[in-house]
Amino acid sequence: MISQVTLRGLEDADLDVLFEFMRDPEAVRMAAFTAEDPDDREAFDAHMRRIRANPETLNQVVLGDGVVVGSIASFVMEGDTEITYWIDRKVWGQGVAGRAVALLLELVTTRPLHARAASDNAGSLCVLTRAGFKPVGTDVGYANARKAEIEETILVLN
């Protein structure tokens, strides 16, 4: 059980472990809106270079008891600041995502703040609503992980 959750800036040395987390088939299915091919390291590295070069993006790793257990970020899309996170499935159900979101909300004070989750991702929707995000609508989009259009819930924290 993880007792302490902290955040720190993303470092080059973190990329290998984050790539492995984002290849986990069950986690990929749950996240739904993922890379077209989670096993494509070249595409992952190119994506990470782009987002790390964007000054409007805050990239952090999530540490559980000092070990990298995920990533969390804020970014601007179409004028809205959004958050996203990915937690290693091995620590799901231990409150890591909720504590990481709370820590990110201390760093990112922009409001409103937006988030999205597959509408059937009950765990992520619970994390976000516990953090104060309110569902404001839904959208349908193509989810690479499921090779189909699915519904996602749009949430806002004011």
Image (tube, rainbow, N blue to C red):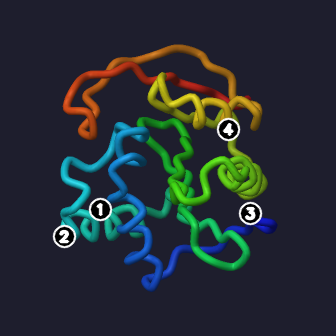
> Mark 3 Cα within 10 Å, few/some/many (few <14, many 20+)?
few
* Front one among 15 and 78: 15
Q: Name the residue under label 4.
A: 127
Check residue 47 in the rendering and tell me which mark sits there, or answer none. Answer: 1
Residue that carries the numbered disc 3 in the rendered image = 1
In contact (CB < 8 Å): disc 2 and disc 4: no
Determine the residue positioned at 69% across, 79% down. Answer: 66
Q: How far apart are marks 3 and 4 (CA)?
A: 18 Å
Determine crowd level at label 2: few under 14, some 14-19, many 20+ residues with C-alpha closer than 10 A. Answer: few
Find residue 90 and report its horizontal and vertical position in percent. 55, 59
Q: Quadrant of residue 15?
A: bottom left
Q: Name the residue under label 2.
A: 42
Q: Quadrant of the C terminus?
A: top right
Contact between marks 2 and 3 (CB within 8 A): the answer is no
In three-dimensional space, the C-alpha distance between marks 2 and 3, rounded to whole angstroms, equals: 34 Å
Which element is circle 2 on? helix
Please provide percent x and percent y for residue 92.
60, 51
Whether residue 108 is visible here, answered yes or no, is no
Mark closer to the chain start, 2 or 1:
2
Q: Earlier in the sequence, mark 3 or mark 4?
A: 3
> For residue 157, which numbered disc appears in the image?
none
> Label 4 amino acid?
Val
Image position of 155 with respect to 65: above or below: above
Q: What residue type is labelled 1?
A: His
Q: In this view, does 84 lie to the left or right of 17?
A: right
Residue at left 69%, top 44%? 110
Q: Hey, what amino acid is under mark 2?
A: Glu
